[in-house]
Amino acid sequence: MAVATAKKTNGKPGPGPKHNIEAAREDYYQRIDKHDMAPLWKVMNSVVTEEPVTRCAPVVWHFDDVKSLVMESGGLITTEEAKRRVLILENPAMRGESKATNTLFAGIQMILPGEVAPAHRHVAAAIRFVLDGEGAYTAVDGEKAFMSPGDFVITANWAPHDHGNTSKKPMLWLDVLDFPAVNFFEASFAQSFDEPTLATTRQDGESLSRYGSGVLPDGKWDKSYTPVINYTYKRTRPIVERMAAAGDVDKSHGARVRYANPVTGGPVLPTMSAWLAMLPKGFKGEPYRATDGTVFVCVEGEGHTEVDGEVLEWGPNDVFVVPPWKRYHHVAGKQSVLFSISDRPAQEALGIWREGK
Ligand code: 1HN
């Protein structure tokens, strides 16, 4: 078959004698630069890396520091003024970007007795993991989910939500949102409502009883996220405790369950998934790594996680980050419970998630 051939150069490179080649290339790069073009061959290895490259650093925030600093914010600004009184947990390697990992925001929110955080909605989905206090609520579409420590509450993409505290104590929780991922796609929308709280015909806690009790309404739920608003600690903790007692303990992750959408068995949100794990006393996990960066909360117990040679010590309500593809293992001095959340379902939907030893 005839093949079109380039102009013959007698074996010499096209542009001219070899000693001129660097100068010729430089001149060429400058000329293509003026047309917003650049040579791939100079950057190829850094844009398509052999292994994941992350800017995210392993980091732990200790609740002793976090709690007193967050409490102090209560005297400086009201929820009414702030809309959401949240201190951002900024990854030290990405300060100023409101990121805990490259795709996830993490922050600590406080609502004082009597306060209301007014209704709004946004494309970014949120999860809340309750750290301290009892009896404040998140309302989704007006349905109130009253929260206790260890509860895991979902606010899906574009779901209207407000928070309130009708208890006598401050309430603190961890917020994790996927907005860095949404913003990567430049697909963010947000809206506030005229009324601070939304009217509803649904009873408090209705979503859990309807969808989280082993029966389902005889109708359709066709959304991309779970219909359950609050996955309570009271219901989930005994499950991992029984698994641990039965020896159903993963060598890396401990006795671990994944929070599921009860309609599909899939993740609670299309962008974020969550897990609860009990590590038996003396647990020393086998090294593990995966491409999803993960935000962990120590719910109970005491131990440490070694990430890429760095030791993150944790105790109750400490929050820590394991970056993508960094090898880590958990060590529990006491029987411990870890909650975790990552962007794994988003990566799986795109076919890019990988795990390894
Ligand atoms: C937000 O709307 C909430 O609704 C919490 O409670 C944290 C962080 C960034 C942007 C929006 C909430 C948030 C947030």
Image (spheres, rainbow, N blue to C red):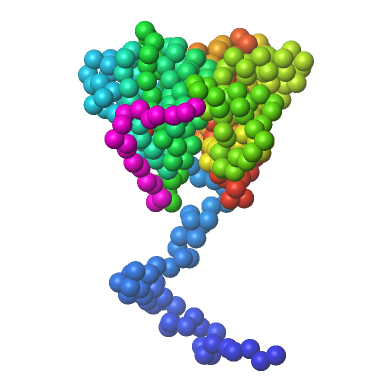
x, y percent for residue 314? 51, 16
In this rendered view, identify the residue nearer to me: 75 or 333. Answer: 75
Q: Quadrant of the N terminus?
A: bottom right
* Residue found 64% across the figure and 38% down from its top: 219
Instruction: Confirm whether residue 212 shows in the render.
Output: yes
x, y percent for residue 156? 48, 37
* Residue found 50% across the figure and 45% down from its top: 53
x, y percent for residue 186? 39, 51
x, y percent for residue 160? 41, 35
In this rendered view, identify the residue nearer to me: 91 or 153. Answer: 153
Residue furthest toward the front? 201
86 vs 169: above or below: below
Whether residue 189 is in magenta: the answer is yes
338 vs 52: above or below: above
* Residue found 36% across the figure and 35% down from its top: 120
Q: Main secondary structure of the magenta part?
A: loop
Image side of residue 181 versus residue 268, left or right: left
Report the span colored magenta: 186-202
Whether residue 47 is in magenta: the answer is no
Image side of residue 321 versus residue 327, left or right: left
Q: Quadrant of the C terminus?
A: top right
